[in-house]
Amino acid sequence: MDYNYPLDYTWSTKDIIDVMSLYNAVEKAYEEGISKTDFLNAYRKFKNVVGTKSEEKQIDKEFQDVSGYSIYKVFKASQENDWIKL
């Protein structure tokens, strides 16, 4: 994809990598499918970086605006399926 990911440049390099891993997992869920386990592992690391629900919602909105993909929709699908493909 050719867009800028929403990142907070005050995050550490490790934090940026963890957030980027979630973005990649969401993209994979839309484009080819991803296992629930792989997605939730990336999501847990993301939640360690982005602690508040409001910050998570803001990042999801920004990510959806630039990519068309929703972190929330993939998370909801992970609650119902072992394989996620949107």
Image (spheres, grey):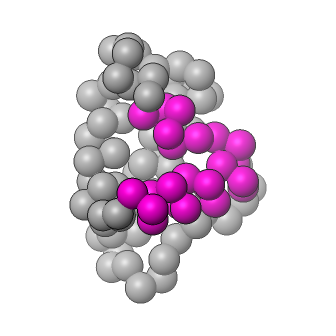
Q: Position of residue 18 (x, y in %)?
A: 34, 59
Residue occupying the point 35% across, 23% down: 79
Which residue reaches farthest front?
Answer: 54
Residue occupying the point 41% across, 85% down: 10
| Dominant secondary structure (helix, strand or loop) of the stretch shown in magenta | helix
* Residue 71 part of the magenta segment: yes
65 or 22: nearer the viewer? 65
47 w.r.t. 84: above or below:
below
Answer yes or no: is residue 23 visible.
yes
Answer yes or no: is residue 28 visible.
no
Q: Position of residue 58 (x, y in %)?
A: 55, 62
Q: Number of callouts in the render?
A: 0
27 w.r.t. 7: above or below:
above
Left or right, residue 55 beside residue 42: right
Left or right, residue 78 beside residue 33: left
* Residue 72 part of the magenta segment: yes
Q: Quadrant location of residue 32? A: top right
Q: Position of residue 42 (x, y in %)?
A: 33, 45
Highlighted range, magenta: 53-75
83 w.r.t. 60: above or below:
above
Left or right, residue 47 beside residue 59: left
24 or 44: nearer the viewer? 44
